[in-house]
Amino acid sequence: MSVMPLLETELDPDPFVQFDRWFEDAKGAGIAMPEAMTVSTSALDGEVSSRVCLLKSCDHRGFVFFTNYCSRKGKQIHDNPRASLVFWWQSLERQVRIEGAVVKTTEEESDEYFATRPRGSQLGAWASEQSRVLAGRGALDGRFEELSTTYHDVVIPRPPHWGGYRVIPLLLEFWQGRTDRLHDRFQYRLRNDVKDWVVERLSP
């Protein structure tokens, strides 16, 4: 696939509109799981950890994903509510980086999304004590079977320790690959609290 340059004249002044354009391009290009993103968090001592999560929604309020609040990332977010997200769409040679503050979604938003998950995934949210040391696979499978019996033919409620996070961007960067490593990079930087975005070209 030929790579098109990213020009200033093609950028939308609203970074969320620009992201939507690229996200739709990624879906249209047949990229497997274009919603996959690397989520990086850090502890107060500076220790950084990263993992891949799935973007579940995006609007002008921010980028939303769901997880176990008691996981390693949940504990780091609790102590240091900042995160970085990275999307990489290889066939398009495009990358989007996002840095911002993190808040929990509302209880209603978490309930609404949890209700859409497959039943097995709902049970899994109860069964897994995410990021904790596990004695063996049998313990996890046994817990899952117990819950399957407990919630047989009844609605599975959302665990109180499971829900959504919203990353509220303070900075977004759109990276388009070019030949000779002379890539196009544009940064949207929040200038003030009224969502006034400054757009700057960065050196590759």
Image (tube, grey):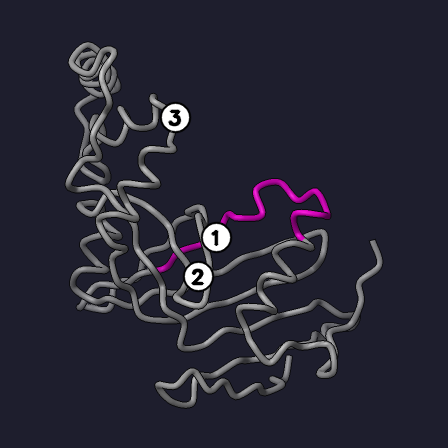
Q: Earlier in the sequence, mark 1 or mark 3?
A: 1
Specify the label residue 85 is tagged with: 2
Give the residue furthest to the right.
2
The amino acid marked with disc number 3 is: Pro
User: Which residue lies at the image location 16% right of the left edge and 64% below the top edge?
Assistant: 79
Please report contact status of discs 1 and 3: CB closer than 8 Å, yes or no: no
Q: Is residue 117 left or right of residue 186?
A: left
Q: Earlier in the sequence, mark 3 or mark 2?
A: 2
State the residue position of label 1.
37
Q: In this view, does 128 lie above or below 177?
A: above
Residue 53, percent across and down? 41, 47
Q: In this view, does 60 lie to the left or right of 43?
A: right
Determine the image quadrant of residue 131.
top left
Residue 130, percent across and down? 23, 37
* SS assignment at label 1: strand
Q: In this view, does 63 lie above or below 51?
A: below
Determine the image quadrant of residue 83.
bottom left
Please report contact status of discs 2 and 1: CB closer than 8 Å, yes or no: yes
Work out whether residue 197 or residue 132 is closer to the camera in this orientation and state it. 197
Magenta residues (range): 26-40
Q: Which of marks 2 and 1 is nearer the N terminus?
A: 1
Q: In this view, does 9 lie to the left or right of 65?
A: right
The amino acid marked with disc number 1 is: Met
Q: Nearer the viewer, mark 1 or mark 3?
A: 3
Residue 37 within the magenta-colored segment of the rendering: yes
* SS assignment at label 3: loop
Specify the label residue 118 is tagged with: 3
